[in-house]
Image (spheres, rainbow, N blue to C red):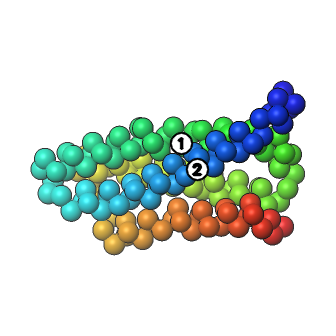
């Protein structure tokens, strides 16, 4: 099995990067959708449109992308023996945190769909920075490998 993974290393890596881009795009979009959703009057047709858009973004882009990122990333880690490297463990921790953020966003979508608006637009705009910060740290860990 390891031989097969080694022969497909570059395909795994390319797929991993492609789906990371899709996942990150969705993680940047969803909190912005939440801001617009919260600005729509409750019970309005616009409110329903935002609920639908958020659901589609989660179902079509975010959940599949995150799943594929994890599968391909773990296959790459097995192929390269990355589990023994400290930089990879730090990256894994950040990806797990980003996945938790993703799950939290999905939960917030459900809250908005029920009419619960727990956060302000300002807080949602600040939350929009989370994936950017995480991505920057992950790229530094993967490229620089500081430890």
Counting residues from the start of the chain, the first of labels 2 and 1 encountered is 2
Give neighbour class at mark 2: few <14, some 14-19, many 20+ (Cα, 10 Å). some
Which residue is tagged 2?
20
Mark 2–mark 1 Cα distance, whole angstroms, equals: 7 Å
Work out whether 137 lies above or below 42: below
> Residue 73 location in percent, x, y?
70, 44
Q: Is residue 78 placed above or below 87 in the rendered structure?
A: above
Residue 95 appears at what percent x and percent y? 63, 54
Compared across the picture, whether 129 is left or right of 51 comes to right
| Mark sitting on residue 39 | none
Q: Residue at x 41, y 38 (%)?
A: 59
User: Which quarter of the figure has residue 10?
Assistant: top right
Q: Nearer the viewer, residue 15 or 120?
A: 15
Mark 1 lies on a secondary structure that is helix
Residues tagged 2 and 1 counted as in contact (Cβ below 8 A): yes
Query: Given the current orientation, which residue lies at the most extreme left position?
Result: 44
Q: Secondary structure at mark 2?
A: helix
Q: Position of residue 140 (x, y in %)?
A: 70, 67
Residue occupying image coordinates x 60% and y 62%: 135
In this view of the protein, which residue sits in the foreground, 121 or 16? 16
Q: Is residue 9 visible?
A: yes
Residue 14 located left or right of residue 106: right
Question: Is residue 113 visible to the viewer in this orientation of the structure?
Answer: no
| Residue under label 1 | 65
């Amino acid at each position: 099995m390891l031989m097969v993974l080694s022969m497909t290393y570059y395909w795994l890596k390319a797929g991993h990067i492609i789906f990371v881009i899709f996942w990150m795009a969705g993680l940047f979009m969803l909190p912005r959708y939440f801001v617009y959703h919260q600005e729509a009057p409750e019970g309005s047709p616009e409110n329903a449109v935002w609920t639908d858009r958020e659901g589609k973004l989660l179902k079509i882009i975010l959940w599949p992308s995150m799943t594929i990122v994890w599968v391909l990333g773990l296959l790459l880690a097995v192929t390269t023996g990355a589990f023994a490297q400290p930089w990879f463990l730090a990256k894994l921790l950040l990806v797990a945190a980003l996945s938790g953020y993703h799950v939290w966003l999905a939960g917030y979508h459900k809250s908005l769909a029920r009419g619960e608006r727990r956060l302000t637009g300002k807080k949602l705009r600040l939350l929009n920075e989370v994936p950017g910060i995480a991505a920057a740290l992950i790229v530094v860990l993967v490229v620089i490998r500081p430890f």
